[in-house]
Amino acid sequence: MSSVPGRSMSSEAAVRNRVADVMVTCPKTLGPLSRVDDLRALFSDDHLHMALVVDLDGRLITTIERPDIPETASNSAAVTGFGTLVGRTVQASYPLEAATTVMIFEARRRLAVVDDSGRLLGLLCLKRDGSGYCSDEGIRARADERERAHSPSPMPEQSQP
């Protein structure tokens, strides 16, 4: 799902021509009862640019970006009162090249991918350098790296006399 090293984004788009072909299928989500403190905890990861709030049936309720939350928002406020779906969603069958063009034009790096009934299917993530798209594998690798960096080092074995 990610860019193959040495391939440009345009050649990737030629091979994978629908949004569904490159979307991340395991985006982090929040539930409908989530509060602003949950959202702020989610945004503590600087790789996360958009919070996806889904109903119990998987329908996307809203998308939230950091600027959508005023600093004065109470930590106990419901997240469903923030964000929007307008301009932040795309159908899975939409042409990838067209979606990428819109994202670049609007300086947007994330679009929530939904089906015809508004159910969340994934997230289209344009890489920071614009060279391609984020992938499930890349996200898992980054999470593994963070876990290794934060886990204690094993104690060296002591030799027995």
Image (cartoon, grey):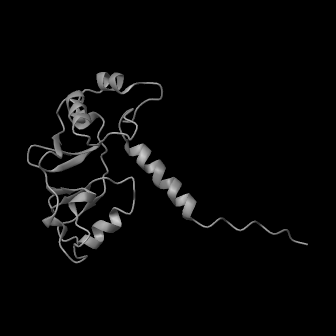
Q: Nearer the viewer, residue 110 or 114?
A: 110
- Quarter of the rendering containing residue 28: bottom left
Q: Is residue 118 left or right of residue 9?
A: left
Give the answer, above or below, for where 16 lies relative to 92.
above
Q: Is residue 130 left or right of residue 88?
A: right
Tell me the quadrant of the picture where the C terminus can be found: bottom right
Q: Residue lying at the far right in this picture: please name it.
A: 161
- The total number of labels drawn is 0
Q: Is residue 83 left or right of residue 144?
A: left
The image shows residue 15 at horizontal and vertical percentages of 32, 23
The image shows residue 94 at horizontal and vertical percentages of 17, 33
Which residue is painted at 43% across and 44% down in the image? 138
Tell me the quadrant of the picture where the N terminus can be found: top left
Give the answer, above or below, for where 154 lies relative to 15.
below
Give the answer, above or below, for where 121 lies relative to 3.
below
Which residue is painted at 21% across and 39% down in the image? 106
Which residue is painted at 22% across and 66% down in the image? 70
Which residue is painted at 47% across and 25% down in the image? 6
Q: Is residue 136 left or right of residue 104?
A: right
The image shows residue 66 at horizontal and vertical percentages of 27, 59
Q: Nearer the viewer, residue 109 or 15?
A: 109
